[in-house]
Structure formats: C-alpha cells, structure tokens
Image (cartoon, rainbow, N blue to C red):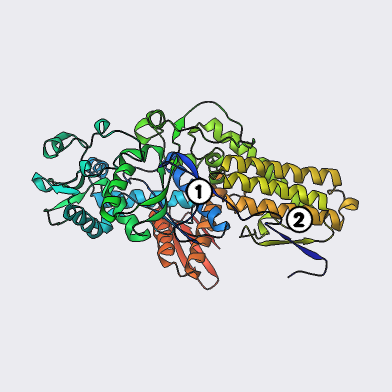
Amino acid sequence: MLTAHDTVRSANQGQPSPVIRIYNTLSKAKEVFQPLSPPSVGIYLCGPTVYKPCHIGHMVGPVIFDTVKRYLSYCGYRVTLVINITDIDDKLIVESQRRGMTVAQLAEEVTADYMANLLAMGVDTVDHFPRAAAHIDEIIRFTEALVAREFAYVADGGDVYFDVAKDREYGKLSHRELESMQGEGGDMRERKRSLADFALWKGAKPDEPSWPSPWGNGRPGWHIECSAMSRRLLGESFDIHGGGLDLVFPHHENEIAQSECCHGKPQAKYWMHNGLMQAADEVGKVGGRNTRSADEPDALAQAAGKLAKSKGASPLAELLKRFSPETIRLFLLSSHYRRPIYFSEDRIREAETSLDTFYRFFQRYERIVGESFYSLVPRASRGADLATSAEADSAAVEIFDAHRRRFLEAMDDDFNTGGAIGDLFELVRALNKHVDMARLEEAAANTPKNRATLQYGTAVLRELAAVLGLFRVPVRDSGSDDALVEDLLKLLVAMRGEARQAKNFALADRIRTGLAELSVTLEDRPGGTVWTIQRSATPSRTGST
C-alpha cells in the first residue's frame, strides 16, 4: 500500500506499446510479432529423443523458450508452452536392446533425468510435455486424413509415406530444391515413389514396439508425431514453432508439409530456430554489451560441429556437480539465441565469475537496507507501476530507468538476451556507483533519499532478472555439493507446493515421481513437507521446508 510519501512511476512512462520483432526462418527476416488470437500465444518446441541422459546441449532450447515465455507473459500475453517427448524412435529401440530393457522402461528412465535437469535449470513454465507413445490414436487419425486427401500412400509391408511431389510448397522452410532432398534409405528405398518421400507410419518389425492401425501393426514416423501433438494441444495453426537449427530439414520441413496439406492453413506463423552448442576452448567475456544481431545462420556448419552424446558430451548431471544451475543458465543466455553457443568449462567459469558481481551487490544491498534482495517481489508486468519514495533522487532514478529501457529494447529485438544481460551488468554497475558516490555504507550518509534511490534501482534489477529467470533463490557462500543439493530440493519442494495450490496436480505428481526415481522421498506433514535422500539401505540425509 502506498503512503503519502510515495509516488508511482509508470513502467511505460513516455513509451509506446511494445513492438516485438521475431526472426522468422520461413521468411528469413524479422517480423513484427502479431499473435493469431491475442492475447493468447501458443508455442511448440521440439524436445528430446529420450534414449540417453541429457547433456548441456539439451538445455539450450528449453532455457531459451522458457525465457521467451517469461518475457511474453511479462508483456501481457497468455502463453501456452509445449515441449514434446519423443519416446518411440529408432534410437530408443537400439539403445533399449543394447541395455536389455523395454523401450518404455528406457524412455521413462531418461525422461525422469530430463525433467530433473529442467527443474534444476529453472525451466518451470512448460504447460505440457506430450509423449508420442501416448498419442498413437491422434497420429493414426492424422495419417488417415493425409491418405484420404491423396497426399500419402500405403506401400508394401504396411508402411505409409508422404508423397512430397503432391506438395507444391515443399522446401519453403529450408529453401531447398526437391532434387537435393532424400528421405529414409535402406530397405524403405524400394517401397517409395520418390527418394524424398518420408514415412508417416512404419510397418511392424520383429522385437520392436508396435500398435494396431488400418495398415497393420506398426509405429509412427518421427515427423508425424509432432504434427499430431501440436494440433491436439495448440490447434491446426498456432503462433511459434521452435527448435534447434538442425531441425529445419528434414524435421520441420516435413512437419509443415504434413500439417498444411492436411489442414489447408499454416501450421505456425513464426518459426524460431536456436543456434547449436559447439565445442570450443576460448574464453569469452560475459556481461559485455552484446547487442549485435545474429548473422544468417550456417545450419550445415553448426550441425557438423554440434555437441552431442555421440561425440562424448557428458551428462548434465555431472556438469551440475561443478557449476550451479544459475551459472549454466547465464552462460546459455549470454549470446543471441540464433548464434552458436561455444561450450567449454572455461567459458562457464567466466560466467561464474561474472555472477559474483551481482552476488556481492546483493550482500551490499542487504547491509545497507536491512532486507534481502531475494525478498523483493519483482514487478510481474511490463505495464505495471512501481512505487518509490518521493525523496528518491530523480536523476539517479532516470539512469536506472534508462538501463531498463535498453534492456527491453534488446528483448523486443528478437529476444536478444545477450544484449539484455549486458544491460543488467550496466545497471548493477550504476547501482554500485550510486552506493559509492553517496557513501551509503557510512551510517551518516545512509539518508532516506539515498536509501529510497537504491531501493528503486534494486527493484528494477530484481524485475529484469526475473524476466530472464535469474536470481530466483539465494546462493550459499560455501559452494559445497551438499548445500547445492539442499537448495535444489527446497526449490523443487516449493515448486511442488505451488503447483498443488494452483491445482496443477500433474506437475506436482511429476516432481514427486521424478524425485522418487532419484531416491528422494517426500512426506507431507501438517507443518510442511519432509524430504529424505535414500543413498543406501538407510536414509543418509533429511530436511524439511
């Protein structure tokens, strides 16, 4: 509640309504973001094929699109974010046979690992995680419609293929000529009308999972899974389809062909593709003013250098033993999402060192004001008003507001998180300068005017950091593994509690199940939730929140 000594500063004071521009792979240009049915926005991001534990490269897309959703929500949109799980695929079949387990068992194990890593990384805005194996009926109906419209044909062995020659716009996303494209080879080659045709449904083979269909037992092709699941959750047309640059062809090209031939309308209005994780040894500065736009991406070069499990990428869980999730999140957001991310542990250490600038300021703020930075409630809406004391120094407040405007300009320009993070560093430097110039750490200079000015600027920092999903929970000084585990468990238990209050029981159950698979049990008691880590036959650690 405001007092007589408070004034209200409008977040958009002197600014027009936000104009957000998105680079659309389809048009190869930045376009003004205009949702199909504002203020609702639907986003579909292609998720992992769950056959091996995830590594840092699997977090690139989720962290980016979690941030995109946070920003669009902050700008007043109602966003639904979907990330699919591919739990039936050739890679799962091969790996499950190698490990002597069923495909379903393997998928469940690796999906739990993926979910745990998402939560550790602060990716908790996803609304749906559809799994392909749970949408077989939808996939079959979709395939039947394409066959009925003569965009697909049934071949020997119970296979169903999409006939690319029937789609006059095939290749419009990747800008490739039909003659340069080739679909699945091997024993499928002889059953197809054209080498570019791709499978919608694959006839059953011995010792492989299969489901009954009008064409005999079989399983879905990869591309049709996403078309069917996106339609079910977001409709025949939705706003944004995202994924890694390596998915432009063939996966997204084939999605467009299937969906648009089936429905006669665009599948997605904007196609966003993030750069791929590359191995590198150089150390790059974090926190500079990286406002440069992304160059035209070289998909083939990035795909060739992509960090992958097949190239020895270690599981993310191992990396999290050496670095905090916040450090890795900052590292992933420190460049424009369309650029490749050059991975090395030296680069992550550079991000870790950069974060100390903020952590030291948070300690300084608490010493001066007597309250934790983390206790500040961030302004949730771009257009919301921020109360500040009338005694605050107007010149300093304008400097803080200017940094905020530049942050928003960077995010409005194709979600340039690298530039936005540069502005966060500029803002914390301005705050430290205010403390130094006003000598706020000296009791005599800690006046209401100087304190009010510091509080206003810090509230702005809290607001903008929240947009990027940063500084959500305090960081322990000890840096020990046990402290990190305890903080992560408290965060997960708190998220579960919030999900239950919001009646999102699916998310609450997923957190409990995922923790149980990691040997962490939860017990709800009248005074709170107690967690126990079962590392051997007897519990090794307990805690509560």
The residue to which callout 2 is attached is 455
Task: Name the one closer to the observer, 192 or 222.
Answer: 192
The structure residue drawn at horizontal position 22% and vertical position 42%, both measured from the top left corner, is 164
Q: Which quarter of the rendered picture does the N terminus lie within?
A: bottom right
Horizontal side of residue 383 vs 539, given as left or right: right
The three-letter amino acid code for the residue at tag 2 is Gln
Circle 1 residue? 121
The quarter holding residue 510 reads bottom left
Q: Residue at x 82, y 49 (%)?
A: 395
Q: Is residue 88 visible?
A: yes
Q: Which mark is residue 459?
A: none
Extreme-front residue of the structure: 168
- In front of the other: 99 or 285: 285
Give the residue at the far left of this rendering: 156
Is residue 317 visible in the rendered image? The answer is: no
- Helix, strand or loop at label 2? It is helix
Q: Position of residue 166 (x, y in %)?
A: 21, 44
Q: Secondary structure at mark 1?
A: loop
User: Looking at the image, is mark 1 or mark 2 nearer the viewer?
Assistant: 2
